[in-house]
Amino acid sequence: MAQTITQKILSRAANRKFVDAGENVWLNVDVLLTHDVCGPPTFDIFNHEFGAGAKVWDPEKVVVLPDHYIFTSNEHARRNIDLLRKFAAEQHLPNYYDVGTERYKGVCHVALAEEGFNVPGTVLFGTDSHTCTSGAFGMFGSGIGNTDAAFILGTGKLWEKVPESMKFTFDGVMPEYLMAKDLILQILGDIGTDGATYRALEFDGEAIHSLPMEERMTLTNMAIEAGGMSGIIAVDEVTEAFVKARTSKPYEIFHSDPDARYHSVHRYDVSKLEPVVAKPHSPDNLATVRSVEGTPITKSYIGSCTGGKLTDFRMAAKILYGQKVAITTNIVPATVQVAAGLDSETHEGKTLREIFVESGCNIALPSCAACLGGPSDTFGRSVDRDVVVSTTNRNFPGRMGSKQAEVYLASPLTAAASAITGKLTDPRDFL
């Protein structure tokens, strides 16, 4: 019987030849991810349910990446790190990347890719809703709660319902003024924040497969903003080159059958799309940048798992080169590796860091930072009545700090162009 790529991956994980959408199956989990926000409660549930002295099912398959509330003196946040350290030491977890050490990586979803944990055909669950980012690598990645994560810790398995799939095909050659962020915001505007509830979003088409891996990660990252269980893109030579450069783990490649059944199929011509934003206070509150052009803003924020990758900063630097920002503009690398890339990557003979500094931007330490607001002394907390243009993935009230702040979600190109003018600005004005 015909299957989607998601069904095939879950069939493998269930040791079955076929699984049907809507069916409940036991999955063998390849990787479990957690971080400083959800790790401590997950470990607490594990210890309570499996008993004193219980061991995790496979220490090699547990990845712990503190990244949210880390550069802070907040005692509660610091206590969470202590709890991670204690559990990692007790369980001899080799993949614990401690903050304040040379092992620290940064934002978990980007670090997973950098460190070779994203392997085609595998199943990865994480205690973070944006774990769907990993689906860019032709694998199944999905966010789960702490109780499910604790069960995986003890057994290596999870009971899951196989999701239906929705297919989004983007035809044509990507214009220089569009980024993956524009594509996913367009989808969200079309189907809404509940339009893909408990479904897999499958992305395909010439435009998608022309994108570098980091841009594909932006697409799959925001599947959850439509209520999706996962986002996924089939493996091609770009995927394989990225994976092989970072791991020697064997993998299996799956593709959807031509006659696979989908909940719905959506098709776009990228030549007919234009730069867009999500207006406050929802990722599906879509508007073209032209239609809201001139809206005054107080801050520009280029960072997070969605907008803090090296590709994002390359695009922002194209706009900011030789310009001065008119408002506070924060550049927040997702990871230590990305931060190093600001010094090694160049544009017009200058490093990205030089371009950002000369244009008047502030460059922060690699972490989630203001994307989740954080304790009061976390870098980048918004203050009352801020109007922010941001490359992050959510703009709910209070998401970046103050409940009075208004956040417009945009691509790095749009965020950079708007930083120069101090108002929402179409990047085509600077390209």
Image (spheres, grey):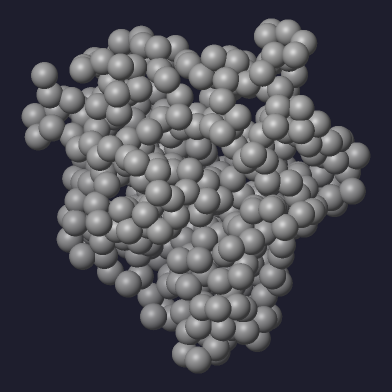
Residue found farthest to the left:
259
Residue 193 in view of the camera: no
Residue 55 in view of the camera: yes
Q: Position of residue 77 (x, y in %)?
A: 82, 39
Residue in view at x 45 percent, y 66 percent: 311
Query: How many numbered marks appear?
Result: 0
Q: Position of residue 89 (x, y in %)?
A: 76, 33
Of the 4 image quadrants, the one containing the C terminus is: bottom left
Residue in view at x 17 percent, y 61 percent: 172
**Is residue 23 left or right of 342 when viewed as pictured?**
left
Q: For residue 343, what is the image quadrant?
A: bottom right
Q: Which of these two is toward me, 251 or 184? A: 251
Residue in view at x 36 percent, y 45 percent: 137
Q: For residue 57, what is the image quadrant?
A: top right
Q: Position of residue 132 (x, y in %)?
A: 45, 37
Q: Position of residue 102 (x, y in %)?
A: 72, 58
Q: Which of these two is toward me, 23 or 201? A: 23
**Is residue 51 left or right of 61 when viewed as pictured?**
right
Of the 4 image quadrants, the one containing the N terminus is: top left
Against 302, is 28 above or below? above
Against 283, is 50 above or below? above
Residue in view at x 40 percent, y 49 percent: 248
Q: For residue 54, what is the image quadrant?
A: top right
Against 199, is 73 above or below? below
